[in-house]
Image: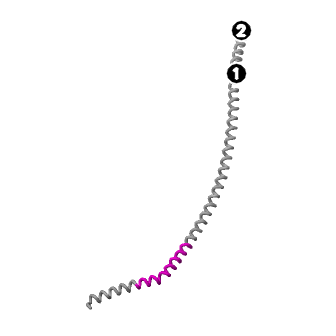
Amino acid sequence: MSPETVQLILGNGVMVAGVVGAVVAFRKVRPESDQIVVSAAKDVVVIQKGLVDDLRRQMDEQRRQLEDLEARFSERLDRAEQARRTAETALAECQRARQVIEKDYRAEKARNVELCERVEALEAEVAALKAVNRDRTPPEENP
């Protein structure tokens, strides 16, 4: 046998031994690999369950906060609506009072014009009476 043939036989033997060893190792590791995968999957499920539970707690807390905010917003909205109605009522009362005042002002302005005309007429009458009275009074004699 030539050294090349021996080398070929040994090389093939090592290769066959490697394949057989790999198959044996795979067979031995295979049941453990299933256990590893199952164990890892259980850990992932536990982690995910914890995460889901935490997210649910956060969601519940945020829901409570949202309900609280909605209640406070509703109260403020009610107070704002009441204030708006009060302001509208006050505005209507002010407008009615202004109309009354404007009506009274117009009436008093007209009365003032009448009184001014009456004063002018009376002043003219007084002036006329003074003129008549001067004409009737005899002049005083000077010594």
Which secondary structure is most common in the magenta stretch? helix
Mark 1 = which residue?
114
Residue at 32 percent across and 86 percent down: it is: 11
- SS class, disc 2: helix
- Residue 95, can we see it? yes
Does residue 33 belong to the magenta stretch? Answer: yes
User: How far from the left and from the top, in percent, is residue 3?
Assistant: 26, 90
On residue 14, the disc is none
Q: Nearer the viewer, residue 103 or 52?
A: 52
Label 1 crowd (10 A; few <14 / some 14-19 / many >=20): few
Q: Nearer the viewer, residue 136 or 17?
A: 17
Mark 2 = which residue?
135
Spatial separation of the CA atoms under disc 1 and disc 2: 32 Å
Magenta residues, start to end? 20-46
Colour pattern: one colour
Number of numbered discs overlaid on the protein picture: 2
Residue at 29 percent across and 89 percent down: it is: 6
- Quadrant in the rendering for residue 109: top right
Q: Using residue 75 as the reference point, say whether residue 30 is left or right of it.
A: left
Q: Which tag, 1 or 2, sits closer to the chain's start?
A: 1
Residue 76, above or below 57: above
Residue 20, above or below 81: below
Residue at 66 percent across and 44 percent down: it is: 84
Q: Nearer the viewer, residue 98 or 52?
A: 52
Three-letter residue code for mark 1: Glu
Is label 1 or label 2 in front? 1
